[in-house]
Image (tube, rainbow, N blue to C red):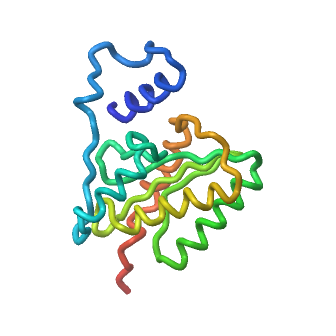
């Protein structure tokens, strides 16, 4: 329910209509606090995280639980979006860390979180920075609000994928 309200609130902010958000919805009450994964140096990670967030001029938002960063990237064509995803995937391979993401035509939605141990890690923050740089290189267009449908595609895929970050026992 809160996820739906947040998505509607973002849509409201982008479209300047209040019809989808309940009158008594208090955004201050629902401000997310980061939840870092065990072993993350919070004192070092917090300033880096803050620089990525929309509230500080960045383009990323925290998820409701504060355990992930997410945003969408829009490009002129599908080919540019695919090139962006390829560039990110190569960085993922060298850093042994992958996103939860989805793509529809020229828009790619990316969510960074660490599954084991659960929460935000330095790798998530590093990969968010890398995504921003790669997106600039491929001509990212001005950002638009994240589509609720695009976010849901990534979320559903994550649930059906199981625990991707825990080695399987043989």
Q: Nearer the viewer, residue 108 or 157?
A: 108
Q: In which quarter of the image is the C terminus?
A: bottom left
- In the rendering, at what x and y percent does residue 93 appear? 54, 76
Quarter of the view holding residue 149 = top right
Quarter of the view holding residue 163 = bottom left
- In the rendering, at what x and y percent does residue 166 appear? 35, 74
Q: Residue at x 49, y 57 (%)?
A: 100
Q: Which residue is drawn at 55% across and 56% down?
A: 132
Q: Which of 161 and 10 is in front in this view?
A: 10
- In the picture as drawn, the residue positioned furthest to the bottom comes out as 170
Q: Which of 167 and 63 is in front in this view?
A: 63
Exactly how many numbered labels are in the figure? 0
In this rendering, would 67 be left or right of 18?
Answer: left
- In the rendering, at what x and y percent does residue 52 appear? 42, 51
- In the rendering, at what x and y percent does residue 106 appear? 70, 46
Q: Nearer the viewer, residue 58 or 75?
A: 58
Q: Residue at x 35, y 64 (%)?
A: 115
Q: Residue at x 39, y 43 (%)?
A: 56
In this rendering, would 28 be left or right of 168?
Answer: left
């Amino acid at each position: 329910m809160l996820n739906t309200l947040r998505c509607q609130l973002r849509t409201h902010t982008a479209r300047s209509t209040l019809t989808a958000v309940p009158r008594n919805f208090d955004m201050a009450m629902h401000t997310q606090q980061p939840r870092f994964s065990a072993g993350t140096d919070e004192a070092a990670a917090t300033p880096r995280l803050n620089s990525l967030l929309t509230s500080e001029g960045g383009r990323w938002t925290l998820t409701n639980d504060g355990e992930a960063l997410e945003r969408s990237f829009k490009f002129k064509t599908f080919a540019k979006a695919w090139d962006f995803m390829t560039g990110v995937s190569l960085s993922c391979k060298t850093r042994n860390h992958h996103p939860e993401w989805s793509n529809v035509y020229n828009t790619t939605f990316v969510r960074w979180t660490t599954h084991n141990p659960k929460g935000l890690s330095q790798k998530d923050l590093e990969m968010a920075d890398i995504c921003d740089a790669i997106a600039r290189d491929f001509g990212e267009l001005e950002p638009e609000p994240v589509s609720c449908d695009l976010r849901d595609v990534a979320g559903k895929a994550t649930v059906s994928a199981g625990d991707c970050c825990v080695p399987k026992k043989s």
